[in-house]
Image: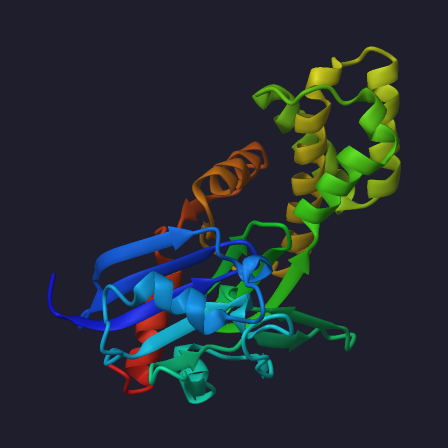
Amino acid sequence: MGTAKLIGIDWGTTSFRAALMDGDGGIIDRRASGDGLLSVTDRDFEGVLERAIAGWDAAATLPVTASGMVTSRTGWVETPYLPCPAGADDLAGALTRLTTAGGRRVALITGLSYRNPDGTPDVMRGEETQIAGLALAGKRLAVMPGTHSKWVRIDSGRITAFRSAMTGDAFAALRDHTVLKLTTADRVEAPGAFAAGVAVGSAEGGAGLLGKLFRQRAGSLMGDFPASETAERLSGLMIGTEIAEARSFAPDVGGPVVIVGGEALAARYAAALDVLGIAHETAPADAAFAGQYRIAKAAGLV
């Protein structure tokens, strides 16, 4: 590894990650903690940042890039969304720069907005930086699993459109706060149950979710499957529905779907795509930091 040239911060609602990078974007060292936005008291974002990275750069000479929910309404500085289409160069031109009380230079990477053909809006924060880090060629489709999953259309590295799905949020709410809770036992690994849920969710182009949810309740009551499988079937049902809806969002995009996310969720979406016979590949784990480096380079910070 070479000399340190950049510090990247991936700052979310519940997590904080930092990477010390050299002049080629290689990661020299890294930090990770649970110091997400929700844990910051008295809006002491600078204090959290300094405790994490001062050991790398006590003199505050290195530029810092930060992406994720840190630029949201509940973050350090709320930045305006940049409309699609946008890529690394556009994000570099839309950086919000601040200098902390301690003299550290921070460049905040903003999120993206998109208007669907019917005029309805969608937004993202953090995912745009991960996509920038992949530097994908041609027309591609990426899925970014999470509490609010994103399906992203990419053309020559630029995001042209995207669609969000509250899959993770809805799964947790349905499992814990609806009648399904009454027939859900402790979750166990059940690949067959998950696959069955994916197939049901994706049927009919993903339509009829509300009815499919109640039929899962009925299936448990009728003894079609044990309560220990309910959570896996529900997870498959939600993800299968999400994938079916996404296929109509990008019918013209070829090539494997790129899965961008943490190892556990990426594996779950890979399994669901396998059930449906959809080719896929998994992106590198450090896409966010790779994106921060590309944006920083385009902005002349390194």
**Outermost top residue:** 223
- Give above or below for 184 relative to 21: above
Q: Position of residue 67 (x, y in %)?
A: 46, 70
| Image coords of residue 293 (percent x, y) | 30, 72
Picture coordinates of residue 168 (x, y %)?
A: 66, 46
Please name whichever residue, 250 or 103, is drawn nearer the observer in this view of the structure. Answer: 103
Task: Tell me how the rendering is colored.
Answer: rainbow
Task: Name the residue located 51 percent from the left edge and 59 percent from the top edge.
Answer: 141
Q: Is residue 206 left or right of residue 299?
A: right
Residue 133 in view of the camera? no
Residue 175 relative to residue 112: left or right:
right
How many numbered discs sit on the rendered protein?
A: 0
Where does the C terminus fall, quadrant-wise?
bottom left
Q: In which quarter of the view is residue 102 placed?
A: bottom left
Q: As drawn, is 163 to the left or to the right of 269?
A: right
- Image coordinates for residue 291, horizontal then vertical, percent: 37, 68
Residue at 45 percent across and 81 percent down: it is 91
Looking at the image, residue 181 lies above or below residue 263: above
